Amino acid sequence: MSRTRNAALLLAAVALLALAGCSGGKQEADNPGGAVIRTTQNPNGLRGAALDQPYAMPAKTLTDTGGNPFNLVTSTKKPVTLVFFGYTNCPDVCPTVMADVASALTKLDESVRDQVQLLFITTDPARDTGPVIRKYLDRFDPSFVGLSGSLTSIKDIAQAVGVPVEGMQKLPSGGYEVGHGAQVIGFGKNDKANVLWLSNAAIGDLAHDFGKLVEDNQ
Protein backbone atom coordinates (compact mmCIF):
# COMPACT_ATOMS: atom_id res chain seq x y z
CA MET A 1 0.00 0.00 0.00
CA SER A 2 1.39 3.44 -0.88
CA ARG A 3 2.31 5.90 1.84
CA THR A 4 -0.22 8.36 0.43
CA ARG A 5 -3.06 5.86 0.54
CA ASN A 6 -2.12 4.70 4.01
CA ALA A 7 -2.13 8.28 5.26
CA ALA A 8 -5.50 8.88 3.64
CA LEU A 9 -7.01 5.89 5.40
CA LEU A 10 -5.75 7.08 8.78
CA LEU A 11 -6.66 10.72 8.26
CA ALA A 12 -9.55 12.28 10.19
CA ALA A 13 -9.65 9.56 12.84
CA VAL A 14 -11.99 10.35 15.68
CA ALA A 15 -9.80 10.35 18.78
CA LEU A 16 -11.26 9.22 22.07
CA LEU A 17 -7.89 9.77 23.69
CA ALA A 18 -7.83 12.36 26.43
CA LEU A 19 -10.80 13.33 29.67
CA ALA A 20 -9.44 13.86 33.03
CA GLY A 21 -11.93 13.11 35.74
CA CYS A 22 -9.49 14.69 38.21
CA SER A 23 -10.77 12.24 40.77
CA GLY A 24 -8.11 10.98 43.12
CA GLY A 25 -6.09 8.93 40.69
CA LYS A 26 -8.85 8.02 38.25
CA GLN A 27 -8.02 9.04 34.70
CA GLU A 28 -10.32 8.49 31.76
CA ALA A 29 -10.08 9.33 28.04
CA ASP A 30 -8.94 12.97 27.48
CA ASN A 31 -11.12 13.71 24.52
CA PRO A 32 -14.61 12.19 24.81
CA GLY A 33 -15.91 15.09 22.75
CA GLY A 34 -14.31 13.36 19.77
CA ALA A 35 -12.06 16.04 18.27
CA VAL A 36 -11.15 14.93 14.76
CA ILE A 37 -7.39 14.57 14.70
CA ARG A 38 -4.78 12.99 12.46
CA THR A 39 -3.18 9.77 13.58
CA THR A 40 -0.38 10.21 11.02
CA GLN A 41 2.56 12.57 11.45
CA ASN A 42 1.43 16.14 11.97
CA PRO A 43 1.74 17.87 8.55
CA ASN A 44 2.80 21.09 10.28
CA GLY A 45 5.94 19.55 11.74
CA LEU A 46 4.45 19.51 15.24
CA ARG A 47 4.44 16.56 17.61
CA GLY A 48 0.98 17.21 19.03
CA ALA A 49 -2.25 15.97 17.45
CA ALA A 50 -3.20 17.89 14.31
CA LEU A 51 -6.81 19.00 14.10
CA ASP A 52 -8.38 18.33 10.71
CA GLN A 53 -10.99 21.00 11.47
CA PRO A 54 -9.32 23.97 13.21
CA TYR A 55 -11.03 25.53 16.20
CA ALA A 56 -11.74 29.26 16.25
CA MET A 57 -11.18 31.07 19.51
CA PRO A 58 -14.62 32.15 20.81
CA ALA A 59 -14.91 35.93 21.09
CA LYS A 60 -16.24 35.61 24.64
CA THR A 61 -15.37 37.65 27.70
CA LEU A 62 -14.49 36.11 31.06
CA THR A 63 -12.98 37.63 34.23
CA ASP A 64 -9.30 37.44 35.09
CA THR A 65 -7.88 36.90 38.57
CA GLY A 66 -7.69 40.65 39.15
CA GLY A 67 -11.41 41.04 38.53
CA ASN A 68 -10.96 42.59 35.09
CA PRO A 69 -12.81 41.58 31.91
CA PHE A 70 -10.73 39.42 29.58
CA ASN A 71 -11.86 38.80 26.03
CA LEU A 72 -10.47 35.59 24.56
CA VAL A 73 -9.81 37.28 21.21
CA THR A 74 -9.01 40.94 21.87
CA SER A 75 -7.15 40.46 25.17
CA THR A 76 -4.79 37.78 23.86
CA LYS A 77 -1.89 39.88 22.60
CA LYS A 78 0.82 37.25 22.08
CA PRO A 79 1.39 35.25 18.88
CA VAL A 80 0.67 31.90 20.59
CA THR A 81 -2.10 31.23 23.09
CA LEU A 82 -2.45 27.94 24.95
CA VAL A 83 -5.83 27.10 26.47
CA PHE A 84 -6.48 24.61 29.26
CA PHE A 85 -9.68 23.95 31.20
CA GLY A 86 -9.22 22.73 34.76
CA TYR A 87 -9.77 23.55 38.43
CA THR A 88 -7.62 24.16 41.46
CA ASN A 89 -9.00 21.28 43.56
CA CYS A 90 -8.14 18.72 40.88
CA PRO A 91 -5.83 16.29 42.71
CA ASP A 92 -3.84 14.83 39.85
CA VAL A 93 -4.21 15.58 36.15
CA CYS A 94 -4.55 19.40 36.24
CA PRO A 95 -1.42 20.07 38.33
CA THR A 96 0.52 17.57 36.24
CA VAL A 97 -0.43 19.29 32.98
CA MET A 98 0.28 22.75 34.40
CA ALA A 99 3.68 21.61 35.66
CA ASP A 100 4.52 20.01 32.31
CA VAL A 101 3.59 23.15 30.37
CA ALA A 102 5.58 25.33 32.77
CA SER A 103 8.58 23.01 32.49
CA ALA A 104 8.38 22.99 28.69
CA LEU A 105 8.34 26.79 28.59
CA THR A 106 11.51 26.98 30.69
CA LYS A 107 13.29 25.05 27.94
CA LEU A 108 12.71 27.89 25.48
CA ASP A 109 14.80 31.01 25.12
CA GLU A 110 13.26 33.89 27.05
CA SER A 111 12.55 35.78 23.82
CA VAL A 112 10.51 32.82 22.56
CA ARG A 113 8.87 32.06 25.87
CA ASP A 114 7.62 35.64 26.16
CA GLN A 115 5.55 35.13 23.00
CA VAL A 116 3.46 32.34 24.53
CA GLN A 117 0.46 32.97 26.78
CA LEU A 118 -1.35 30.26 28.72
CA LEU A 119 -5.00 30.70 29.68
CA PHE A 120 -6.27 28.53 32.54
CA ILE A 121 -10.08 28.57 32.45
CA THR A 122 -11.64 27.18 35.60
CA THR A 123 -14.32 24.51 35.34
CA ASP A 124 -15.23 25.10 39.01
CA PRO A 125 -16.14 28.80 39.28
CA ALA A 126 -18.08 28.21 42.52
CA ARG A 127 -14.85 27.52 44.42
CA ASP A 128 -12.22 29.06 42.16
CA THR A 129 -12.27 32.75 43.01
CA GLY A 130 -9.73 35.10 41.46
CA PRO A 131 -7.32 34.97 44.44
CA VAL A 132 -7.60 31.17 44.64
CA ILE A 133 -6.75 30.75 40.95
CA ARG A 134 -3.90 33.28 41.17
CA LYS A 135 -2.29 31.51 44.12
CA TYR A 136 -2.64 28.17 42.32
CA LEU A 137 -1.13 29.35 39.03
CA ASP A 138 1.74 31.15 40.72
CA ARG A 139 2.98 27.74 41.86
CA PHE A 140 3.67 26.92 38.20
CA ASP A 141 4.29 30.19 36.35
CA PRO A 142 3.22 33.70 37.43
CA SER A 143 2.66 34.61 33.76
CA PHE A 144 -0.21 32.11 33.42
CA VAL A 145 -3.56 33.89 33.08
CA GLY A 146 -6.46 32.56 35.16
CA LEU A 147 -10.03 33.10 34.01
CA SER A 148 -13.47 32.51 35.45
CA GLY A 149 -17.10 33.26 34.69
CA SER A 150 -20.48 31.62 34.90
CA LEU A 151 -20.43 27.84 34.51
CA THR A 152 -22.81 28.20 31.56
CA SER A 153 -20.42 30.54 29.75
CA ILE A 154 -17.45 28.34 30.50
CA LYS A 155 -19.24 25.25 29.19
CA ASP A 156 -20.20 27.10 26.01
CA ILE A 157 -16.60 28.18 25.39
CA ALA A 158 -15.30 24.69 26.13
CA GLN A 159 -17.81 23.10 23.77
CA ALA A 160 -16.76 25.47 20.99
CA VAL A 161 -13.18 24.17 21.22
CA GLY A 162 -14.04 20.50 21.67
CA VAL A 163 -13.51 20.24 25.43
CA PRO A 164 -16.31 18.57 27.42
CA VAL A 165 -17.07 19.96 30.88
CA GLU A 166 -19.34 17.71 32.91
CA GLY A 167 -19.88 19.97 35.91
CA MET A 168 -20.11 18.83 39.52
CA GLN A 169 -20.12 15.15 40.42
CA LYS A 170 -20.77 14.46 44.11
CA LEU A 171 -18.38 12.24 46.04
CA PRO A 172 -19.22 9.90 48.93
CA SER A 173 -17.12 12.17 51.17
CA GLY A 174 -19.62 14.98 50.62
CA GLY A 175 -17.37 16.98 48.30
CA TYR A 176 -17.40 16.96 44.52
CA GLU A 177 -15.14 16.62 41.51
CA VAL A 178 -15.44 18.20 38.08
CA GLY A 179 -15.08 16.05 34.97
CA HIS A 180 -13.45 17.87 32.06
CA GLY A 181 -11.27 17.36 29.02
CA ALA A 182 -7.55 17.55 29.79
CA GLN A 183 -6.14 18.58 26.42
CA VAL A 184 -4.09 21.75 25.92
CA ILE A 185 -5.10 23.59 22.75
CA GLY A 186 -2.66 25.75 20.78
CA PHE A 187 -3.92 28.90 19.02
CA GLY A 188 -1.95 31.07 16.61
CA LYS A 189 -2.15 34.81 15.99
CA ASN A 190 -5.12 34.26 13.66
CA ASP A 191 -7.09 32.93 16.67
CA LYS A 192 -7.30 29.49 15.08
CA ALA A 193 -6.09 26.24 16.64
CA ASN A 194 -4.66 23.47 14.50
CA VAL A 195 -3.06 21.39 17.25
CA LEU A 196 -3.74 19.98 20.70
CA TRP A 197 -1.70 18.00 23.18
CA LEU A 198 -3.08 15.21 25.32
CA SER A 199 -2.39 15.10 29.05
CA ASN A 200 0.40 12.54 28.65
CA ALA A 201 2.40 14.61 26.11
CA ALA A 202 6.16 14.55 26.75
CA ILE A 203 7.71 17.78 28.03
CA GLY A 204 10.25 17.71 25.20
CA ASP A 205 7.47 17.47 22.63
CA LEU A 206 5.62 20.38 24.23
CA ALA A 207 8.76 22.53 24.20
CA HIS A 208 9.43 21.66 20.55
CA ASP A 209 5.90 22.51 19.52
CA PHE A 210 5.63 25.75 21.52
CA GLY A 211 8.81 26.98 19.86
CA LYS A 212 7.61 25.89 16.44
CA LEU A 213 4.28 27.67 16.90
CA VAL A 214 6.06 30.89 17.85
CA GLU A 215 8.25 30.57 14.76
CA ASP A 216 5.23 29.95 12.53
CA ASN A 217 3.29 32.90 13.94
CA GLN A 218 5.75 35.75 13.47
Image (cartoon, rainbow, N blue to C red):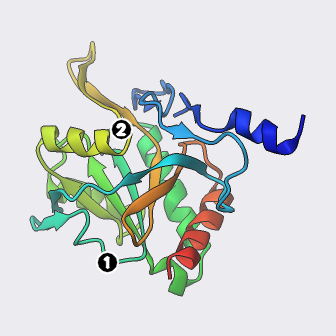
Residue sitting at the far right = 1
Q: Residue at x 57, y 41 (%)?
A: 37
Amino acid bearing label 2: Cys
Q: Residue at x 68, y 60 (%)?
A: 204
Name the spot of residue 170 as percent of width and height, x first.
Answer: 23, 18
Checking the image for residue 90, the label placed there is: 2
Say which quadrant the N terminus sits in: top right
Q: Quadrant of residue 46?
A: bottom right
State the count of labels. 2
Residue sitting at the far top = 172
- The reply, left or right, for residue 142 in relation to residue 25 is left
Amino acid bearing label 1: Lys
Q: Residue at x 38, y 77 (%)?
A: 78
Disc 1: which residue: 77
Which one is nearer the viewer's eye here, 110 or 10?
10
In the displayed structure, 115 sits above or below 205; it is below
Which is in the foreground here, disc 1 or disc 2?
1
3D distance between C-alphas at marks 1 and 2 = 29 Å
Checking the image for residue 38, the label placed there is: none
Q: Is residue 87 visible?
A: no
Q: Is residue 196 visible?
A: yes
> Disc 1 or 2, which lies upstream in sequence?
1
Q: Secondary structure at mark 1?
A: loop
| Crowding at mark 1 (Cα within 10 Å: few <14, some 14-19, many 20+) | few
Q: Secondary structure at mark 2?
A: loop
Name the spot of residue 200 as percent of width and height, x first.
Answer: 60, 42
Residue sitting at the far bottom = 111
Name the spot of residue 9 as percent of width and height, x first.
Answer: 72, 33
The answer to whether mark 1 and mark 2 are in CB contact below 8 A is no
Name the spot of residue 177 as percent of width and height, x first.
Answer: 29, 28
| Crowding at mark 2 (Cα within 10 Å: few <14, some 14-19, many 20+) | some
